[in-house]
Image (cartoon, coloured by chain):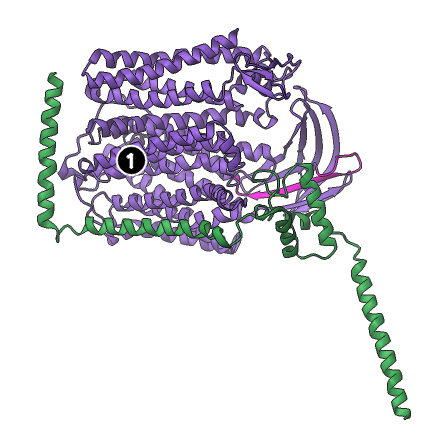
Amino acid sequence: MWMKKQLRIIAYVLTLLLVLAGLWVGSAKAQTPTPPTDDQVNAIARQLYCPVCENTPLDVCPTEACRQWRELIRQQLSEGWTDAQIKQYFVANYGARVLAEPPRSGLNWLIYILPPAFILLGVYILYRALRTWIKPSTAAPASSESDAKPLEDEYVAKFEEELRKRN
Amino acid sequence: MLADFGYGILVVSFLVALYSVGAAIIGVWRKSAELVESARRAMLLTWPLISLSAASLITLLITNHFDISFVYEVTSRSMPTYLKITAWWGGQAGSLVFWSWLMSAFASLVTLRKWDRDREFLPWVIVVSGITIAFFLSMSIFFENPFARMWFDSSGNVVKAMVQPVGTTPVPLQPDGRGLNPLLRHPGMIIHPPMLYLGFVSFVIPYAFAMAALITGRTDDRWIRITRRWTLWAWLFLSCGLVLGSRWAYDVLGWGGFWGWDPVEIAALMPWLTGTAFLHSVMIQEKRGLLKHWNMILIILTYALVVFGTFLTRSGVLSSVHAFASSPIGPYFMAFVTITFVASIVLVIYRWPQLRSDTEMKSLLSREALFLLNNLLFMSVLVVCFWGVIFPLVSEFFTGQKVTVGPPFYQRATGPLFAGLMLLMGIAPLSAWGHSSLQSIGRALWKSALAALALIVLVFFTYTKNVIALIGFYLVALVIFVTLQEFWRATRARQRAQHENFFTSLARLTGRNRRRYGGYLIHLSMMLMAIGILGINLFQVQTQGTVPVDGKLNIQGYTVQYSSIAAFPGPDGRQVTRAVVNVYKNNQYLGQLYPRIDYYPDAQQTMTIPGERPTLSDDLYIILVDWQPASSNGATFKIYVNPLVNWLWIGAFIFIFGILIAAWPDKDPEYVPVVTHNKAHQPSSAD
């Protein structure tokens, strides 16, 4: 009985301590005396683009609107938002154009897929071309035939040119 | 009155350009030398005519004729006269006239050359340049008239027209103009557009000759030999335009960099990429008679990209597809690009059999094969750039969603491609035309490769452990060593043979093989530029803070101390807010810098001019930030340290010097070395 009472008191005290500790930690967090620095704001703003101008990163945009957006980032940082949350907020409000690169979804995949596809195609074409050019031994009879043609063309061309000069 | 005269002359020059096109075509048709000569003279007339029109426009600009819409938009009373003149190309309407004027100057120059050996090209060169001039003039005449006056329509909107449209009232004469965009009042921006335009229009000349070759069927390399120097000069101007534009961005835009992968920048870079590929690949055709199709396609692409680049920056398409659709010049421009491109390609296909190669490629390691790889890499960079610029439009068109394609995309995609190009720059000069083996290249390469490796080990222990930087610096060192070794080897050989001193030998060697050694100098300069680009991209650091008077900001060993701030009126009506800061490095006093903000009341715009302290190791770049209004008790500064960036500008000077060496006219420009088949198979010493 006595034991039980004692245990209960200990439990109460512990709970109280925990709550107090929690409050203390919480208040300590809420009262962070140092507001976010300009560098911290810029570090995020640099990854975002001005939602209204053309191709201007938010950290260097001189417009009044961007000044207010940077203040918004400062406020969000001081409220403990993470980088990802802030970016998400801007995308939700101003569209994907605030990101430095199109998000990897839907039609946007084209921007990431098409250039490598074209480059690979180029590599393939070059490879095929080099292969046909560099293996003349197997195509010897064909090449002698094609050799003859330009010669004739050249002759005709020269002839034509002479005629033209005389005209 | 003067405006009507200027506009009238513009219409006359348009008609004259059309006449020269028509006369040239009919002249060929009827085999009439007189008509072709008449076409040539008409072409020669366009330049003085457009000059007269331009002179009228300049007169209007410097005499404050604010009843003319263009004058009202780009000048103001407070602007000095030289700026009023340069405002000619500062605004859209004037810049299109400027384009036509330069184009007609180049077309006139080319028609004045000696045509004895190439009579059959003449009419077609006139046709191509005439169509191009007529197209740009038609834009000024019908859509972007710089001489138009302003009128109010019934709902109070301003309408621009030469004569009063029905139902409008004249806009009362404005006391002052709005003034040129302050960003365009910087010396860099005054020279940059003419350079870029010169590059653009001079690429039209090789294109015109290529078309003439296709149409006449004279598809040997004559057109390439004629236009070799035109192409080099075009490349020089375009490159200067790009470099000046970068320097301007660095000094004026106040974001600590020079290249932001902005669509406007890329629009100018794209013809440069194909032009550079073309410069390399024509050598294959000259030396080995290969790749005739490809050279045609490259010059066609370059021309198309020149017009497309002008279109991108002039049609408003970049701000939105809808702006493009509503602007009259957008679709017109697009139609012109499409028609000329398709017509050119059809011509290539028509002449496909005649463009067959004279010889065959012998080895994967021959110089021509390596040049092909170079072309592949340049084309890959082009694909990345083109698609990066176009994709936001595609996305907006199909989904209505606007997206940004920014630097991270381009850096990731083009970085490895540029690294590949650097590697080729290290290997290709050591390979021979026709045939090379791994052994022969290895023998020539190993010393440089080893020396570069030793240098990189040093860099690793003293400067950086960043892997990308180490790879980049290794390639830079490799190319520099290979190129210097080439200079050294050839100079020593000549010195021994001719018994000259080293510097005489070096100068004469370069003088005799200007294209080759000018080219090597360009390679060297590119590497210096690469050092700057690697430096600023990989190692840039920045900080920002608000400090009271005497307060300090620290960054990378630098200490910046805010000393004072003052506001005063500038010489041309601007309001200058100028801060004075003391700069220390490792507590040693270095001097003062003066970052400032200029406010232009006429244009209601500010400009942020950084205080810069350039050294070979880095650039201290301080901006007075206009986040908060500057006051006497505190100011906000943003400070960048841009490592190695000044090598970029040093490289740019050497680059221009290199092109001048390569492009300087010969004593006898008509001298053509005869390349016989036997000779073509041997490694050649002169290219």
Residue that numbered label 1 is attached to: B345
Residue shown at 87% from the left, 83% from the top:
A10
Any idea which chain is the purple one in this picture? B
Q: Residue furthest bottom?
A: A1
**Quick check: is B51 in the magenta stretch?**
no
Q: Nearer the viewer, residue B204 or B19?
A: B19
> Measuring 40% from the left and 11% from the top, which residue is drawn there?
B12
Would residue B122 appear left or right of B377 to someone viewing this image? left
Q: Residue at x 19, y 31 (%)?
A: B220
Q: Amino acid at mark 1?
A: Ile
**Residue B546 coordinates in the image, percent (x, y):** 74, 42
Q: Residues within 10 Å of mark 1 (few under 14, many from 20)?
A: some
Give the vertical position of B25 relative to B675 (above or below).
above
Pick whichever, B482 or B207, lies toward us. B207
The answer to whether residue B495 shows anywhere in this view is: no
B683 horizontally vs A38: left or right: left
Name the colour assigned to chain A in the rendering. green
What segment is highlighted magenta in the picture? Answer: B627-645
